[in-house]
Amino acid sequence: MLHHVLIACPPGSEPVLRDFYEGVLGLAEIPKPPALAARGGCWFRGHGIELHLGVEADFRPARKAHPGLLVRDIDEWARRLGEAGYPVAFDDDFPGMRRFHSEDPHGNRLEFLEPLS
């Protein structure tokens, strides 16, 4: 069982991350332990997902590596992202799943999947 996925972010980007992961995706920020909070970044949880955003001084966005987020009502997720100005690229390349790719404010790739009924 997977506990969380860590996604890299640039230093000082917490406000932008909160706007996206809370405001657009609807995840709730959860407190980091004090020893880890001093390193920057932030953690989010919701919809059965836990994502940790960790600061990398020499940050570069993950264009290929990505979390695959299993969601319900994928069209609603796509709508929210699209209305907020983020890319939504559906494809039919994953048998048994509807899926699309998007990205966070720093260009990290995100995949959203929903099983076909």
Image (spheres, helix red, strand yellow):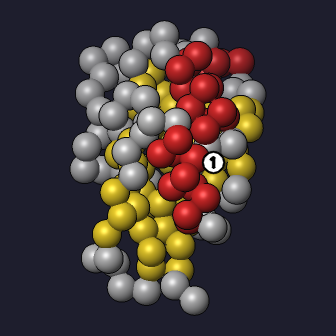
Residue 45: x %, y % from top left: 69, 44
| Residue 82 relative to residue 33: left or right | left
Which residue is pictured at 64% across the width and 68% down the height?
Answer: 72
**Tag 1 residue:** 50
Which residue is pictured at 39% across the width and 52% down the height?
Answer: 88
Mark 1: few/some/many CA within 10 Å (<14, 14-19, 20+): some
- The answer to which of 117 and 50 lies nearer the viewer is 117
Q: Is residue 74 above or below residue 38?
A: below
Is residue 112 something one can see in this rendering? Answer: yes
Quick one: quadrant of the N terminus? Answer: bottom right
| Residue 67 relative to residue 50: left or right | left
Residue 111: x %, y % from top left: 42, 57
Tally of numbered tags: 1
Q: Secondary structure under badge 1?
A: strand
Image quadrant in which you'd find residue 7: top left
Is residue 52 something one can see in this rendering? Answer: no
Residue type (three-letter) at the residue carrying disc 1: Glu
Residue 22: x %, y % from top left: 66, 34
Residue 20: x %, y % from top left: 56, 32
- The answer to which of 50 and 37 lies nearer the viewer is 50
| Residue 48 relative to residue 94: left or right | right
Quick one: quadrant of the C terminus? Answer: bottom right
Q: Is residue 77 above or below residue 43?
A: below
Which residue is pictured at 63% across the width and 54% down the height?
Answer: 49
Q: Is residue 29 above or below residue 66?
A: above
Which residue is pictured at 69% across the width and 59% down the height?
Answer: 48
Q: Is residue 17 above or below residue 89?
A: above
Image quadrant in which you'd find residue 40: top right
